Image (tube, rainbow, N blue to C red):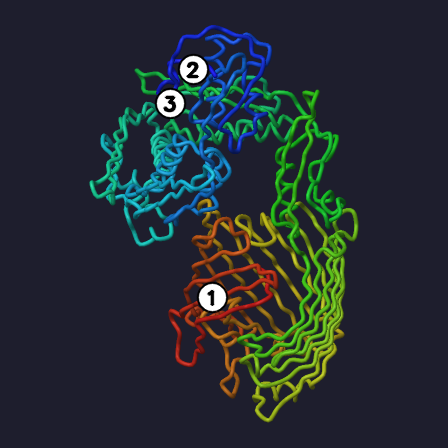
Amino acid sequence: MKRLRLAAALLFLAVTSTTVWAFDSFVIDSIRVEGLERVSEGTVLNYLPVKVGDVFDQKQSTESIKALFKTGFFKDVRLEHDGSQLVVLLEERPAIASITLEGNKDLSSEELLKALKGIGLSEGKVFDRQILDKVEQELRRQYYSRGKYGLQIDSEVADLDRNRVAVTIKISEGKVAKIKQINVVGNAAFEDEDLIDEFELSTSNWLSWYTKDDQYSKQKLSADLERLRSYYLDRGYIKFEIESTQVSITPNKKEIYVTVNVREGDVYKVNEVKLTGKMIVPPDQIMPLVQIGPEDTFSRKLATETSKGISDRLGEEGFIFANVNMVPDINEEKKSVNITFFVDPGKQVYVRRINFQGNTKTRDEVLRREMRQMEAAWASSTKIERSKMRLERLGYFQEVNVETPAVPGTADQIDVNYSVVEKSSGNITAGVGFSQVQGIIVNAAVTQDNVFGTGKRVNLTFNNSQVNTIYQFGYLDPYLTLDGISGGFDASYRETNFAQANLAQYLTDVGAVGVNVGVPFTEFDSLRTNLDYEYTNLKTTNQTPTQILDFISENGNAFNEYTVALGYTHDTLNRAIFATQGGSHTVQVLGAMPFSDLDYYKASLRSRHYFPLAQDLTLLLGGEIAYGGGYGGTSQLPFFENYFAGGPNSVRGFLQNTLGPRDSNNRPIGGSSKLIGSAELLFPVPLIKESKNLRLGAFVDAGNVFDGGYDFNEIRVSAGLSARWLSPFGAIMVSLGQPLNSKQGDRIQNFQFNFGSGF
């Protein structure tokens, strides 16, 4: 049998063993493929650019070899002919039987294998050494971006039977290179320390273990350079430039030096500010939004905020795609700048439909009644965002997102699409637990904040502990009317042993029923009224203090009380749980009606406000001031209506309820006035990304209760750390507090926890 080896293109001579021979063209009457192990013959014939009946010549030989090599399946291709039969001789590339990663800690194996698959290296794929080289380069890039310049990668390829290979990638990550020094060169107007304080990157400090700010990252440096540029542009240095940046690493690859070379230029003042374009909103409403004016030092921040403010104002009129561009006209001679804001309102658009997605339990009407943006009305960016916030404040959803896509085929319509991720809004619990104050607790409770997806709240509770035995039922409809008037009722029976709650020794049996109505006045303000009837029966022991015995001797031990309470609330919180901005401020006044057995009143102001300091840092300031007393035939506030302080919900670090006045047995009895204040820095848990149900805090608490009036010399102060977790079983708060000015007789409790309270 005569065989003639066909010539291949010079491009493939380096990777094949093909020899170039001269031959005559011939007509193919059949094709034979040899050397296949995994690839099917049909696949080869499909890629081969010739078929039976074609005239085969030198040109088609070159094209055929190119086509087969291009598949990536073969490492050697030869073409021969036996008479009129074309013979294709192939040597397949090995297949990857397994990929093993060793030594990787910073990047998980799951993440790496997923990334390798995207590059083309995965089990079952054809092995290509060039791809493995690319993988090593990508791994180096990934680790270098995390500051691990001591990285070593060793790849091993072991041959297996049936033309397979096992790939092992051994990674020695090394230690993260720390930033040893950051230098800014060329600055004269500002000190190095002031500029470097703007950087996220930093040299090592006592918080670096958490912030990782001493670990170099190219992305972080780019962001820091932009912060540096903004720092100068916000202070009038329009011509400021970053001329170069050098990043050098020590030979041992453990320390990094960063040098930034800058050219400051001169400070420019604003000479004139103009508005031009199509003014949809009256100028007298636009001008207050302009935050920069003549004789001011130029500030890009103020100019940007002005543009955004005007855009937002136009968005309220339906021009949600408005563009407001700031154009500076620089006068080099006078070192001044004229600022022109070009207003392009675009088309006024209105909302075609409002759609909801993800609310598998909650009815559409519950979401729709929170909407401040209406269908078929002009679109308002403010109302769309406010509607989103109201959905978040319901407390039914883990996440709320909104999109405003344009309606296809129109230029003046959008849809508003809200997508929600529901969370459990109810609890069914039954069991035995333990509380620091109440001891052993036997409880059973059914609570549903969104019963049957209607938004109504129902709770049924049984609780039995050393302190309390409670039976309670409550119902609330937040939308009793279409105007948002809420209404509800509750009934309860409670037996309490106050001695077990660290208080004076006495017991009460209390039965109560009541109704409540809430009336919203504005988007953020509401008034709530409670009407309650309460029957109280006092019981004494042989250790009941004289104060209580004297009260019973004067007023009796059983009372029928009819009370009315008015509460005014201003609430701008962005979320019902784990808020990050806004505040809640409540003023409440309660009084016993004249035909009650006891005449008394109580008034309080409770406030908390969240201030976002950074993306993950929030400052919480809160406080409460309260006062109560008697009137008519009652000389003082009944002792069982007293205020208490100390514990997880007031001054942490002190035993719950133990601060303030003492009885004749030297046990806490509470006071008729209360003053509490707290400051807390809230931040996420280190090493746990995007945890929306868990956060930490560093706090300072101060306060006490008093027997009428306020004595600031008796204020107690504590500081410590806290943790809040919205667990599947309820809200849990843990604190570790240290009193800073405790006095003799104070009862200290450094570690405290609270289960089931909202926060």
Q: Are marks 2 and 1 in contact (CB under 8 Å)?
A: no
Q: Badge 2, how many Cα within 10 Å: few under 14, some, many 20+?
A: some
Q: Position of residue 595 (x, y in %)?
A: 76, 74
**Mark 3 lies on residue:** 15
Q: Position of residue 198 (x, y in %)?
A: 34, 40
- Residue kind at label 1, given as amino acid type: Ser
Q: Position of residue 724 (x, y in %)?
A: 52, 60
Between circles 2 and 1, the one closer to the viewer is 2
Q: Earlier in the sequence, mark 1 or mark 3?
A: 3
Residue 721 visible within the image: yes
Q: Secondary structure at mark 1?
A: strand
> Taking 612 as reference, is 499 left or right?
right
**Mark 2 lies on residue:** 5
- Residue kind at label 3, given as amino acid type: Val
- Residue kind at label 2, given as amino acid type: Arg
Q: Position of residue 312 (x, y in %)?
A: 57, 31
Between circles 1 and 3, the one closer to the viewer is 3
Residue 561 visible within the image: no
Q: Earlier in the sequence, mark 2 or mark 3?
A: 2
The number of callouts visible is 3
Residue reaching furthest to the top: 24
Q: Is residue 228 above or below residue 679?
A: above
Between circles 2 and 3, the one closer to the viewer is 2
Q: Which of these two is toward me, 568 or 3?
A: 3
Q: Which mark is residue 453?
A: none
Alpha carbon separation for disc pair 1 and 3 = 69 Å
Q: Is residue 639 above or below residue 619?
A: below
* Quadrant of image for the C terminus: bottom right
Q: Secondary structure at mark 3?
A: loop
**Mark 1 lies on residue:** 735
